[in-house]
């Protein structure tokens, strides 16, 4: 066999193994016959999670699991959790609905029961840690990734690692090595997996491809702005010009003036993520990776010249949407786009997913996607200088990446993990990220298309997606997650407090109640107080470790 053919065969073999279509033993055996070195195989097979050669495609005992281990099939015949009830605390939002969807299916399969309690986002953190410190009522909590540092404040962490469960083949099969690396980080702490796969958030730019592609709109833009229409915008200036251009006239033909950019900026409703996403390329660059604090002193960087310019430019987008959007929730912001009244929105993957549902929108087949536009210069807050670039772009994992962790106080850890792993099994994870009502976005290799992933577009079409929408969405999503420059995600203890202080002040700026510089200076002072309370040296050590 020629060298080129051997390489192609190995790629196909690897894709089949990662997709669960062949066993670990068969993969190793056939790779060895191709002359693949043990060193290379060890990088592809870093862990022997659960299944090994015991995986089969399906079994009547588990109609919602594929692949499944032979041990799992035998385990389920006993209805192993009959008489066992687990208690789950979730966010009252689409992600909570996504979890609840799987409850009756798991109950039928295992004999167990699941009680789900829902709380709003503004009290979720408080209720999680109140329960951990007092009543221990819940076995598992749906957490935002920024809560993680607080789970590790006590000497014995509040949550348990999942490795012991992952190695036991009686549980539903899923493989943490299938994660896109940027997503896996948000489920781990010091190299150990603590969260079970569910969500995978980042923010990119979505736009009306059909409207952008119209030659008459492109010519009208050029006549007004003096340069060719950027399809899609690559810089923040282009994004602002496009948003301004599409604001205030009837480009959708419904007899009403339309908008250029939708936002959802209500305080305590994740609106601050807009600022974090738009600010990233103003601060993070090939020359600087620090967005939050100076790693040597833990002095806040949030009021740097780069952050300030980002906030000033963020405010300039406000006239491109309804004035009410500063108090809108996520759903209200999405609805402006989904109803066809807005041409762009920088947000999470819920938007294109809802667009596939004819009950939610008529935009199926009309969705474009791109990374967040960049900037021609970025401020290095460590050196105190602006650096120029041809184009500085920055990836992000902004959002909750909502998922469940198991309380160390739970008396029902096995049943709890079984339920969480059930939702992480491949067909269930794929269902979640292809349906808008679940609030879930893709974070696993099997959810992306070759050459970067092992999935295929037919799987998405079978779930109701337009093929081109899916390709554009996943291409841009993956590009964002793998850009060379990435905005770091804050997960040190107190992250929820740091972000709350920023959130309320960003909201005040958008409402015209304070000026950007004053708001960021005030935020920095509030952050200093939080750092002192948690201990500067402890916070510095954890912050530095997050970049190791």
Image (tube, rainbow, N blue to C red):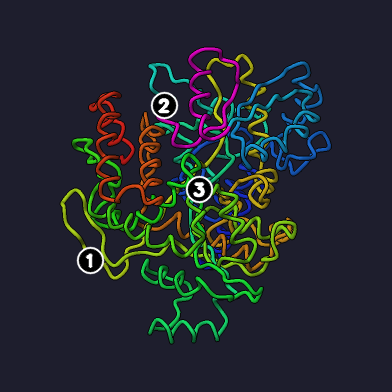
Q: Which residues are magenta?
A: 120-149
Q: Is residue 513 above or below residue 1?
A: above
Residue 284 appears left or right of 52 = left
Residue 172 appears left or right of 320 = right
* Nearer to the camera, 405 or 245: 245
Residue at point 37%, 29% (across, down): 493
In primary-sequence order, the first of circles 3 and 1 is 3
Residue 196 appears left or right of 518 = right
In primary-sequence order, the first of circles 1 and 2 is 2
Q: Which residue is mark 1?
A: 388
Image marks 2 and 3: residues in contact by CB distance under 8 Å? no
* Nearer to the camera, 210 or 71: 210
Between the C-alphas of marks 3 and 1, the distance is: 36 Å
Residue 58: percent from the left, percent from the top? 77, 42
Please state, as top left, top right, bottom left or bottom right, where the C terminus lies in the image: top left
- Quarter location, residue 424: top right
């Amino acid at each position: 066999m020629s060298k080129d053919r051997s390489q192609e065969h190995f790629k196909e073999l690897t894709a089949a193994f990662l997709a669960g279509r062949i066993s670990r033993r068969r993969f190793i055996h056939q790779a060895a016959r191709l002359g693949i070195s043990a060193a290379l195989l060890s990088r592809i097979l870093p862990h022997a999670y659960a299944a090994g050669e015991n995986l089969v495609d399906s079994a009547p005992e588990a109609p919602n699991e594929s692949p499944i281990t032979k041990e799992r099939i035998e385990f389920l015949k006993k209805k192993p959790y009959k008489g066992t009830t687990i208690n789950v605390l979730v966010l009252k939002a689409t992600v909570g609905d996504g979890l609840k969807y799987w409850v009756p299916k798991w109950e039928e399969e295992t004999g167990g029961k699941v009680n789900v309690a829902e709380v709003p986002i503004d009290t979720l953190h408080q209720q999680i840690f109140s329960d951990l410190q007092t009543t221990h009522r819940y076995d598992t909590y749906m957490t935002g990734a920024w809560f993680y540092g607080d789970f590790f404040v006590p000497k014995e962490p509040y949550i348990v690692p999942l490795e012991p469960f992952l190695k036991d083949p009686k549980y539903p099969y899923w493989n943490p090595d299938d994660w896109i690396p940027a997503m896996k980080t948000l489920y781990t702490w010091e190299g150990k997996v603590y969260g079970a796969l569910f969500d995978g958030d980042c923010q990119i730019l979505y736009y009306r491809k059909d409207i952008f592609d119209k030659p008459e709109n492109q010519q009208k833009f050029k006549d007004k702005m003096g340069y060719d229409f950027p399809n899609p915008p690559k810089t923040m200036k282009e994004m602002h010009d496009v948003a301004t251009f599409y604001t205030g006239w009837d480009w959708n033909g419904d007899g009403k003036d339309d908008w250029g950019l939708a936002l959802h900026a209500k305080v305590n409703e994740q609106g601050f993520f807009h600022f974090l996403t738009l600010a990233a390329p103003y601060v993070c660059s090939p020359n600087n990776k620090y967005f939050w604090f100076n790693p040597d002193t833990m002095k806040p960087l949030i009021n740097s010249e780069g952050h300030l310019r980002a906030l000033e430019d963020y405010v300039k987008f406000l006239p491109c949407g309804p004035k009410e959007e500063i108090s809108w929730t996520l759903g209200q912001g999405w609805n402006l786009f989904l109803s066809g009244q807005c041409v762009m929105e920088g947000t999470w993957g819920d938007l294109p997913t809802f667009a596939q549902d004819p009950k939610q929108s008529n935009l199926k087949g009309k969705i474009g996607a791109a990374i967040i536009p960049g900037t021609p210069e970025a401020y290095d807050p460590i050196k105190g200088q602006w650096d120029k670039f041809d184009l500085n772009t920055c990836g992000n994992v902004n959002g909750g990446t909502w998922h469940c962790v198991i309380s160390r106080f739970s008396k029902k850890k096995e049943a709890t993990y079984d339920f969480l792993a059930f939702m992480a099994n491949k067909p269930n994870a794929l269902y979640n990220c292809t349906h808008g009502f679940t609030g879930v976005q893709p974070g696993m290799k099997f959810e992306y298309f070759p050459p970067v992933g092992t999935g295929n577009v037919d799987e998405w079409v079978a779930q109701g997606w337009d093929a081109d929408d899916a390709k554009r969405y996943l291409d841009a999503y993956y590009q964002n997650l793998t850009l060379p420059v990435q905005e770091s995600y804050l997960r040190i203890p107190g992250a929820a407090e740091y972000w709350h202080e920023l959130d309320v002040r960003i909201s005040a700026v958008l409402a015209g109640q304070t000026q950007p510089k004053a708001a960021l200076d005030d935020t920095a002072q509030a952050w200093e107080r939080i750092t002192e309370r948690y201990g500067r040296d402890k916070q510095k050590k954890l912050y530095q470790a997050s970049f190791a």
